[in-house]
Image: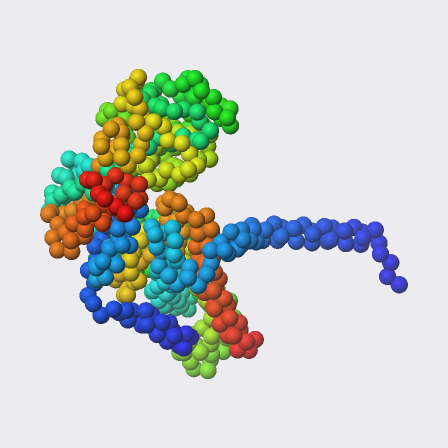
């Protein structure tokens, strides 16, 4: 018969203590999230209606909806993704699969990490100089999206590189031994196994892209536009800036409106994320290990 | 992945399809935060009148608008102060000829908390409150007590230094050479000033009359100590009796032509002037609005 010793009981107690401590930390972490969502739903919920989502702002932006801003944010996110995802994945593939481990590669890696730390307002000024003025895109969706893409590129590169490196080296070696080239190995073995991690990076990117205000303020977003954007060379309204505007710039806005705009912004991000997560789960189902 | 990319391409493609066949004329309009809400109201109405002319409105401050005009990135720069000689020279160096148009007048209201018993201020007193080395720092120096303001210390609410409101208030109240007192709270936008004063019993702030709400009080202003004070209103700004009313400007590069001229003419027409009046600013001339 197993007799519990004094020491055993003590260990169990400590175990329970830490378990509760860590659980409390988790609860503490999700409390702000729940509070934010709760506040937005309670205060902004009444503002949400089909009309709010699909009409233009009217009467000096104190009435009507936010459709141009909603559409604008989708534009910005999609164009930014189209620019940064292929570029980011290609860069990560080179760094992880091809690049020799020398000072140049290390310098590039360091540069990428540092790029991730650059404040968004600095990216904004870079965007004005590079895309708006030098490349002469003007204040447009293209300039704003490229600025956002540059800003989020490090996230994509780092997430992709990490997930590529998580694919066991033995997989690659097995493939090479069958006579496959590097590219064939990447295409058939490495990428399919790394895709879920890459998508995580993209999810993070979407959230940041949709939420950032500074980089688009000078490069493509307008206070008010009486039309919907028709091409990447048009200016656009955007949810993040619209939220700033109705919260701080326009007098006599009904109090539920800023909350409503914030709720729509968060919902859009969650929707984009849900799409990628479903896709990721589907891919994970395909995985054989 | 391929299907995903293809789907994305279709979405983007669909979004790029022109919604209307007509060629669109864009007018870029940027600048003053004081004017931004009127500019927005004009743009909102103008698309109903001329569906092929779209006015894109952006704020940022008078300085931002004038800088954009100098850089050649806007057609109409909004400003709540007149352009400086230095800026004109800079513009001319780049081949840009700023032309000034007065589109309305704005009474600059001095806001105080609704519990604040102060009724009026003379410009001299305001200068002592806001000006560098000014003597008035506490509300009890004016012989008043405000419920909820124990410290009695005045909280001076001001604007960021590229704001036309900031520049005009300095010129009109402090005098050209005098600077603001250190320690003012510089807000990024007129509405921020109003919001802060609404919630702070010790505060005093200034902004365009159009930003007034029923939750705060506006001081009656006299040009000299002892003279009769005038309340800020559209009427007193129009007839010039209110001491701190200022013209609001739009600047163009050279004399306006084509659609930009048409838009400016419409702004100065009775319809356009009624819109600015409805927003709480004074029109450039007497207009009869329904």
Identified at 22% across, 53% down, the residue is: B28
Q: Position of residue B45 (x, y in %)?
A: 27, 54
Choose between A106 and A27: the one closer to the eye: A27
Rendered position, A282 above or below B254: below
Residue A215 visible (yes or no): no
Q: Quadrant of residue B220?
A: top left
Q: Residue at x 36, y 56 (%)?
A: A57
- At 25% from the left edge and 41% from the top edge, which residue is drawn? B62
Q: How many marks?
A: 0
**Does B284 sit above or below residue B58?**
above
Residue A13's place in the image compared with B197, above or below, is: below
In the rendered image, the vertical position of residue A285 relative to residue A37, given as above or below: below
Q: Is residue A2 left or right of residue B236?
A: right
- Res B5 quadrant in image: bottom left
Q: Return the residue nearer the eye: A179 or B45.
A: B45
Residue A4 found in image quarter? bottom right
């Amino acid at each position: 018969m197993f007799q519990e010793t004094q020491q055993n009981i003590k260990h169990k107690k400590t175990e329970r203590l830490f378990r509760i401590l860590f659980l409390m930390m988790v609860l503490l972490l999700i409390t702000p999230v729940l509070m934010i969502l709760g506040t937005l739903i309670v205060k902004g919920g009444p503002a949400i209606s089909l009309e709010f989502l699909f009409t233009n702002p009217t009467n000096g932006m104190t009435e009507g909806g936010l459709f141009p801003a909603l559409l604008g944010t989708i534009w910005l996110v999609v164009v930014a993704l189209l620019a940064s995802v292929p570029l980011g994945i290609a860069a990560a593939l080179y760094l992880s699969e091809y690049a020799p481990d020398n000072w140049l590669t290390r310098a590039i890696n360091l540069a990428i990490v540092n790029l991730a730390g650059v404040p968004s307002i600095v990216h904004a000024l870079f965007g004005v100089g590079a895309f708006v003025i030098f490349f002469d895109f003007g204040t447009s969706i293209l300039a704003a999206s490229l600025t956002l893409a540059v800003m989020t590129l490090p996230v994509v590169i780092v997430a992709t590189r990490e997930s590529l490196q998580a694919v066991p080296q033995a997989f690659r070696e097995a493939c090479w031994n069958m006579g496959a080239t590097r590219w064939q190995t990447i295409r058939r073995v490495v990428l399919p196994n790394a895709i879920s991690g890459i998508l995580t990076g993209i999810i993070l990117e979407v959230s940041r892209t949709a939420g950032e205000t500074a980089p688009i303020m000078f490069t493509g977003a307008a206070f008010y536009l009486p039309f919907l954007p028709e091409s990447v060379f048009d200016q656009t309204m955007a949810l993040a800036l619209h939220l700033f505007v109705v919260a701080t710039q326009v007098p006599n806005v009904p109090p539920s409106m800023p909350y409503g705009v914030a709720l729509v912004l968060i919902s859009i991000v969650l929707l984009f994320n849900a799409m990628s997560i479903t896709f990721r789960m589907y891919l994970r189902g395909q995985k054989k290990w | 992945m391929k299907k995903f990319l293809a789907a994305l391409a279709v979405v983007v493609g669909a979004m790029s399809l022109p919604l209307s066949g007509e060629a669109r004329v864009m007018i870029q309009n940027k600048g003053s935060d004081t004017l931004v809400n009127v500019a927005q109201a004009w743009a909102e109405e103008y698309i109903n009148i001329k569906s092929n002319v779209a006015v894109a409105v952006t704020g940022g401050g008078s300085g931002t608008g004038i800088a954009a005009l100098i850089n050649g990135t806007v057609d109409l720069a909004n400003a709540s102060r007149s352009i400086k000689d230095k800026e004109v020279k800079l513009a001319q160096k780049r081949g840009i000829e700023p032309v000034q148009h007065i589109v309305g007048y704005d009474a600059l209201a001095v806001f105080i908390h609704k519990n604040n018993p102060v009724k009026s201020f003379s410009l001299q007193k305001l200068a002592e409150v806001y000006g560098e080395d000014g003597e008035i720092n506490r509300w009890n120096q004016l012989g008043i007590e405000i419920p909820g303001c124990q410290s009695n210390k005045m909280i001076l609410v001001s604007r960021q230094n590229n704001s036309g409101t900031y520049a005009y208030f300095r010129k009109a109240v402090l005098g050209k050479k005098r600077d603001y007192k250190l320690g003012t709270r510089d807000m990024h936008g007129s509405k921020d000033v109003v919001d802060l004063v609404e919630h702070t019993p010790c505060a005093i702030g200034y902004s365009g009359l159009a930003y007034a709400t029923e939750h705060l009080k506006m001081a009656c202003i006299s040009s000299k100590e002892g003279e009769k004070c005038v309340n800020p209103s559209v009427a007193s700004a129009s007839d010039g009796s209110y001491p701190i009313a200022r013209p609001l400007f739009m600047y163009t590069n050279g004399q306006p032509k084509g659609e930009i001229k048409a838009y400016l003419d419409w702004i100065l027409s009775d319809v356009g002037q009624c819109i600015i009046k409805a927003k709480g600013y004074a029109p450039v001339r007497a207009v009869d609005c329904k």
